[in-house]
Amino acid sequence: MRAYLSWLLIALLLVLAILAPIGQGNYITYVLTSWLVFSIAAMGLNLTLGYAGQISLAQASFMAIGAYTSALLTLAGWHWMAALVPALLLCFVVGLVLGYPALRVKGHFLAFVTLAFNTLVFLVLRNEDWLTGGNYGLSGMPRPDFGFVSTMKQHNFYYFTLAITVVAAAIMWWIVRSPWGRGFKALRENPIRAESLGVDTRRITLLAFAIGSTYGGLAGALISPLVQFIEPGSFAVGHSLRILLMVVVGGAGFFFGPFLGAGVVILLPELLRFTEGYYLIIYSALVIVMLVFTPRGLIGLWGMLRDRFFGKPQIRADVEQGPKLK
Amino acid sequence: MNRRVILALSAALLMGATAVQAQDAAKIAMVAELSGAGAPAGTNWRDGIKIAIEEINAAGGILGKQVEVSEYDTQTDPQVSRAMVQKAIDEGAFAILGTIYSGSTLVNMLVAQQNEIPQFVGSEAPTIVQKGNPFVFRTSSGSQKGVPALVPYFTDTLKAKKVAVAWVNNEFGKGGRDVFTAEMEKAGIEIVTDVPSEQGATDYASDVSKLKESGAEAVFVYMNQEEAARFLIEAKKQGLSMPLVGEVTLTEAKVIELAGGAAEGAIAHVGVTATATDIPGIAEFNEKFVAQFKRNPTHDAIKGYIGAWATKYVTEKVGEFDGAKFAETMKNLCLPVAEYPKMLLDTCWDETGEMSRPSFMVQVKDGKPVVIGTVPAN
């Protein structure tokens, strides 16, 4: 019965996502598309951080790698779908490499290692202007054309992004329910116990980074045809923090958390624009309020309300599980 | 309980977000950096436009229609600026004023071009008018024109043989620095040190000491406002003795306000300055601005003002609200100040949207920028 209900809910959300841009102008559609793109990036970070418990402040740099790879290849005449393969592969490999420090350092130290990596990528993009265009960035990336349908129009591009998002979410759904997914959670809850039960924590840590980074790369590959202009400043450390905020606000370790979080971070300021000069102040205040009252994110809000009205099941403190930010 | 009240309130706020627009007004969109790193420039741009629109409406609007300006904040983020230009066009704007940061303009001008909406920008990076976009027009000369106007000052006034460059490493700084380096090479002046710094940097100690030891006779400083102010403070602290010469930003009101006494003696070539009070239009604008906003206008304020008035003059020349015809009329157009007093100075645009008009050399004396010379239009 419960499974039936959740499928119904997912179908309902999907229908809503399909109906959302109908009758809306290009601006709303553009904002909705960037919500989907950032949801994908946040989904990747949610795997690394929420499921596997490895903090990463480098998600924007993987978006950059994905965006620049696909931009350079599509500008050279490749089809976007063809350019996607090397973009994702590169992100996977670089993510794997970045995973190595995670085998040695944890918590805040790992955060700083990834932060340094993000800065490094930013500097490379800016200084190697023979390849990346430096400060001037790259512009005029074509949007993919599939013969029967071109995504040049804003609405078409939205549905194209939605299709990619659904596929990416389905793969993520499968990953977190696979033995790997259980491995990720075991790593988060208690790495020593996981190791003693035969989980290869080394491999699982590296995979958490590599898969999370690949999702970042996919988001980047979508950003470049969406904005049709990329520059290093769009992938600086501040944007990594923004993606982290999406994961935390939405609910780290919950499957739908990133969608909700990206919704808050991308859509809420736009909805608040009617307050003109005050909109960023109100937005920031709302984020603080949310984090104070629902430290487990907006998805956690449901659990909190349920516990409040239907009573809380007693759990022994030493076996209590759930995603936490260390 | 509290939580539910807060959630309900915020939900109610969101629901009420439908603004009622006045009918039958000409809509102009002001898209600018009202928050983030570009806020000092963006807010001045906005306030200059506000004054212009009040004057335009008092003079009967554009083609007999009152003008309505909507503000769109880009947060100094190129991606947001693109969304904002899109939003402005969706909401029926017939012209766009902004943005100022070149990185943003390069992104959002594509959207205005696709929709054939004329756009006056405050950006100075050379690339903006080199993309063949017929709908983008500057409100000040690009750095490929502004920086060469500085060269006579180095060769004739300072008689320098060795100079140094300190610049902010973003698309604005890089553009100016590249043009300057090329111009110096042409003039036979050697560049002994080249010091890039980060956007938003706070520590210029090592940069200044590098310049101090470089043996340069003058330093060309090319940074955004906040960075320029911090640089000047550090230069004063370390007693950097050679002349500091900049383009536009270095002697701006905002920089002088932030740097205080450290800005004393700084020299810059500016396209247009509110301190050029010998020109009647500028003196009048300056007075109005100070009375209304209780601070001195920067060149961005004047740029916004000119952009708004140019929109009126050119639309009335065309005789209807038509983007394509507007762009056609703008090609090689000159608006002499005798006929179009609110342009403040004789102003021309070429076929790419580049602008030319007379400009000024300015030096900070007793905490105020003072005009020390004029440079003819190039």
Image: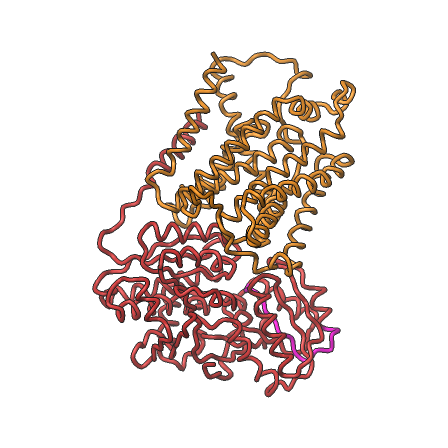
**Looking at the image, can residue A267 be seen?**
yes
Residue A136 pos. (x, y %): 56, 60
Residue A15 pos. (x, y %): 40, 29
Query: In the shown orientation, is residue B367 left or right of residue B321?
Result: right
Q: Residue at coordinates 34% horizontally, 54% vertically from top-left?
A: B70
Report if residue B45 lies within the magenta region: no
Q: Residue at coordinates 39% horizontally, 68% vertically from top-left?
A: B290
**Looking at the image, can residue B77 be seen?**
no
Residue B349 pos. (x, y %): 40, 74
Near-viewer residue (A185 or B167): A185
* Residue range (magenta): B212-225
| Residue B171 to residue B157: above or below | above
User: What hue does chain A carry in this figure?
Assistant: orange
| Residue A149 to residue A176: above or below | below
Q: How many marks?
A: 0
- Quadrant of image for the N terminus of chain B: top left
Report if residue B217 lies within the magenta region: yes
Q: Quadrant of residue B261?
A: bottom right
Colour scheme in use = by chain
Near-viewer residue (B19 or B376): B376
Near-viewer residue (A320 or A216): A216
Q: Quadrant of residue B330?
A: bottom left
User: What hue does chain B carry in this figure?
Assistant: red
| Residue B222 to residue A304: above or below | below
